[in-house]
Image (cartoon, grey):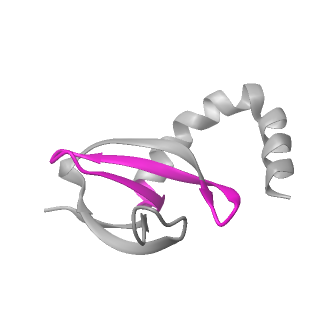
Amino acid sequence: MSLHKFKIVSPRDVQSVDNVFEVLLLNLDHIVSVKPIKMVIEDKVANGYWIRASNGKKYRAIEVPAAISDLLNTEDRANAVICAKGEDQIQAEMLN
């Protein structure tokens, strides 16, 4: 069993805009996919991850194990060189 710690975002209730951050241990053998996403947290745009498990459950995470983030960042670096300057400027303007 390969349990790793994820920090997920879960709403307090369906109609609430408040988010609660919870630590969740997931078995990496049961993760189907991890996709980098942008999330709105406390009126700011944050980088996050959309996680799908083999049992059909879906999670939004703000922190994932280093092995997963390193794997995604390695692939993203190759694509980021092309458009990094424009996106960084746009993201900085959105966060200010």
Q: Nearer the viewer, residue 24 or 71?
A: 24
Q: Is residue 59 magenta?
A: yes
Left or right of residue 43, residue 56 in this image: left
Image location of residue 34, percent across then percent down: 38, 43
Q: Is residue 1 above or below residue 51?
A: below
Image location of residue 71, percent across then percent down: 45, 44
In which image quadrant can residue 33 be found? top left
Left or right of residue 63, residue 90 in this image: right
Image location of residue 85, percent across then percent down: 83, 36
Prevailing secondary structure of the magenta residues: strand
Question: What residue appears at the point 77 percent right and 35 percent down from the top-left corner?
Answer: 84
Highlighted range, magenta: 40-67
In which image quadrant can residue 81 be found? top right
In which image quadrant can residue 12 be found? bottom left
Image location of residue 1, percent across then percent down: 13, 62
Question: What residue appears at the point 70 percent right and 61 percent down from the top-left corner?
Answer: 43
Question: What residue appears at the point 39 percent right and 74 percent down from the top-left corner?
Answer: 22
On-image quarter of the C terminus = bottom right
